[in-house]
Amino acid sequence: MFKIKSHLRKIKRKYNEKDKSKYDFRLDQSERTVLFNPNFFNNFIKTLNQTDFITYPYLDGLKNKIANYNNVKKNNIFLVPGSDVGIKSMFELCVTPGSEVISTLPSFPMYKVYCDLYKAVFNPVSYEENLTYSLENMKSLISKKTSLIIIANPNNPLGDYKTKEELESFIKLTNELEIPVLIDEAYIEFSPGTLKEFTFKYNNVCISRTFSKAWGGAGVRLGYIIGNTRILTYLNKWRLMHEVTGIAAKYGGYLLDNKQEMENYVSLVNKEKEILLDQLTKAGFDVIPSYTNWIHFNDHTDNKRADKILSTRNDVAYKGNTQIPFDERLNWIRLTVGPNLHKQDFIQQIINIK
């Protein structure tokens, strides 16, 4: 066996890949839960031709559309095949062996994976009993070893959100200390609003975005980073050639041309979260609301009955046995929320357990 870098053996990674074709309800990975209107999707298919498959992609058209959507310039956009790759790109740019990366615990698991990959120390601030984290505590972790700070806003997996007013002084400090900050906005469409203005006000801030959640493009792998030209110039130096496919770029452009589809879907999801919060709370469940497209819920004992209803269904994919900070119950259920979810029979069975 050839020699493998020793630190790679220590990386722990969980995979959650499933054959989604057998599930009518895909409620486990925060994807769009319902199909597009057939006319909407078929109209996109009609735009494809052989050239899209046999030639390397030209991406300026998509960059222009993303820039217009975000009211920025084209050279402030860095395209990636999913925001996960954008996050990794920031590690490649900033993180050195032995340095420290600050984020939160819990957080998106790939932050820790990338720390291990680049021999950095993951130095998170823990969540508190009110299910948010203290920026003062995060500030106290900053040292000369800090190479990157990642703020998921809204957070994954708890779904809390910090406003511009809450974050401003912290971001100002990191800029003065010349510490790069990546704000992960994977779920921003479901939240009160973006913090992209920080990328122009402060030289150290980048924003990562994805088409996988609100836009309904998880299968094409498409995302982008918003940042100043100095940072993006460096990211472009080592990006893979043609890593965003022409098909993905065309789909992303089509979604942006028809952004009302996304906005309508987000509106339906946010309304549905309110309905589920109300119905589950009245039924005696503890429910954690979020600024994302999911909810967590648990009853006051062991949640086994709700879990059994879902686990015995062969057509429902969901996240069970999740844990919430400062709560001894280990079997919270997390469900991706989609339009009219409360009307499904398995949800009504859960609501009527009591």
Image (cartoon, rainbow, N blue to C red):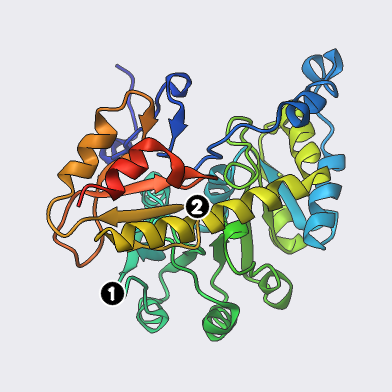
Instruction: In this rendered view, identify the residue nearer to me: 193 or 307.
Output: 307
Q: Amino acid at mark 2?
A: Asn
Instruction: In this rendered view, identify the residue nearer to me: 164 or 80.
Output: 164
Q: Number of numbered discs present?
A: 2
The secondary structure type at the circle numbered 1 is: loop
The secondary structure type at the circle numbered 2 is: loop
Q: Is residue 174 left or right of residue 330?
A: right
Instruction: In this rendered view, identify the residue nearer to me: 106 or 339.
Output: 339
Q: CA distance from mark 1 to mark 2?
A: 22 Å
Instruction: In this rendered view, identify the residue nearer to me: 40 or 113.
Output: 40
Residue of label 1: 128
Contact, CB < 8 Å: mark 1 with mark 2? no
Q: Position of residue 248 (x, y in %)?
A: 71, 31
| Residue 317 at least partly seen | yes
Residue of label 2: 293
Instruction: First in sequence, mark 1 or 2: give its number.
Output: 1
At a point 70% along the width and 33% down the height, the residue shown is 244
Q: Position of residue 10 (x, y in %)?
A: 26, 40
Pointer 1 local density, CA inside 10 Å: few below 14, some 14–19, many at least 20: few
At a point 56% along the width and 67% down the height, the residue shown is 180
Q: Where the N terminus falls, by quadrant?
A: top left
Pointer 2 local density, CA inside 10 Å: few below 14, some 14–19, many at least 20: many
Q: Amino acid at mark 1?
A: Glu
Quadrant in the rendering for residue 183: bottom right
Q: Position of residue 311 (x, y in %)?
A: 25, 32
At a point 80% along the width and 44% down the height, the residue shown is 258
At a point 26% along the width and 74% down the height, the residue shown is 129
| Residue 113 at least partly seen | no
